[in-house]
Image (cartoon, helix red, strand yellow):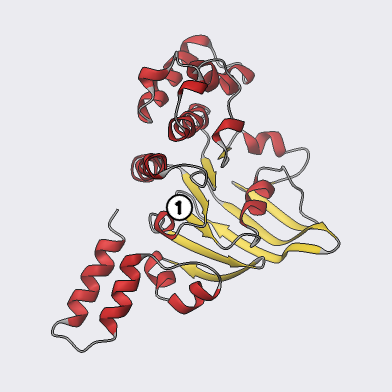
Amino acid sequence: MNLVMENISFAYNSQTEVLSDFNLTINDGEMVAIIGHNGSGKSTIAKLIIGLLKPDKGNIYVDGELLTEDTVEKVRRKVGIIFQNPDNQFVGVTVKDDIAFGLENHMIPRDEMIRRINHYAGMVNMLPYLEKNPEQLSGGQKQRVAIAGVLAMETEMIIFDEATSMLDPLGTKQINETISQLKNNQNKTLINITHNLEEAALADRIVVLSKGKIILDGTPREVFSHKDLLEANGLGVIDSIKLINEVQKYSIRRKQELVDELWKLTFEK
């Protein structure tokens, strides 16, 4: 499933233009990380894609379908989103009820609903928790339930909108492992909106935003090689990249082999 954002402009008010003549294409089955400092336009893009916001100018095509007021519900059947605060996403009394919520709204037959609940809860390692109340879960577990709910709808695209920003290190690790599993085993288009460069390294491609503009777009290795530009835009470089840059400064034997191996280890999926 592909996405095309064509000449998009958007402002929350006359004084605050977030995106101006913005263009982005994401290909079918691609995992793309969108990164940038706070206020760069990352989350605005997510809300535009699912029709929570309407662009002032330009067009958005989801799987070839022009996003309009008439097509937004059809598009939302194809695109799922995981927001940053897991506590705001629960609508059911139990985990099972929550995963079932979207399925019930779309009148999925009961047998198929049960199959999907069990299958996708198992995929995110939440099968033993189906009868649990959400209040009994950790933040990472709640986010995994939210992912199961989106997976159960069998959407073709999933957007993670700062999905780990409110989690502790363990919860973050659990969600990133789930995202990696989806990338490797599911034929889905994934968009990970984040400020965390270690999470971005999991993607096939990284798009870097600054003031609503794309300043870098390429593979993780291509993007992370622009250390100075990333740091100038408030994005700290991960430790392994710092090490690579230090190694580059010195004249040592087999330096290029060492650098290549460090790059390989950095982006090993």
Quadrant hosting residue 7: bottom right
Relative to 185, 80 lies left or right: right
Residue at 86% x, 62% y is 14
Q: How many marks?
A: 1
Quadrant hosting residue 16: bottom right
Is residue 230 shown above or below 70?
A: below
Residue at 37% x, 69% y is 221
Q: Residues within 10 Å of mark 1 (few under 14, many from 20)?
A: some
Res 65 visible:
no
Is residue 249 shown above or below 266?
A: below
Relative to 243, 207 lies left or right: right
Instruction: Pick out the residue farthest to the right.
Output: 14
Q: Secondary structure at mark 1?
A: loop
Res 219 visible:
yes
Percent coordinates x, y for residue 245 in the rendering: 32, 78
Quadrant hosting residue 120: top left
Residue type at mark 1? Glu
Relative to 169, 240 lies left or right: left
Give the labeled residue for mark 1: 30
Percent coordinates x, y for residue 150 in the rendering: 52, 32
Percent coordinates x, y for residue 4 in the rendering: 62, 56
Closer to us: 39 or 56: 39
Closer to us: 242 or 180: 242
Percent coordinates x, y for residue 211 in the rendering: 66, 68
Relative to 59, 218 lies left or right: left
Is residue 242 shown above or below 116?
A: below
Instruction: Pick out the residue farthest to the top.
Output: 110
Closer to us: 218 or 139: 139
Is residue 84 shown above or below 153?
A: below
Instruction: Pick out the residue farthest to the bottom.
Output: 251
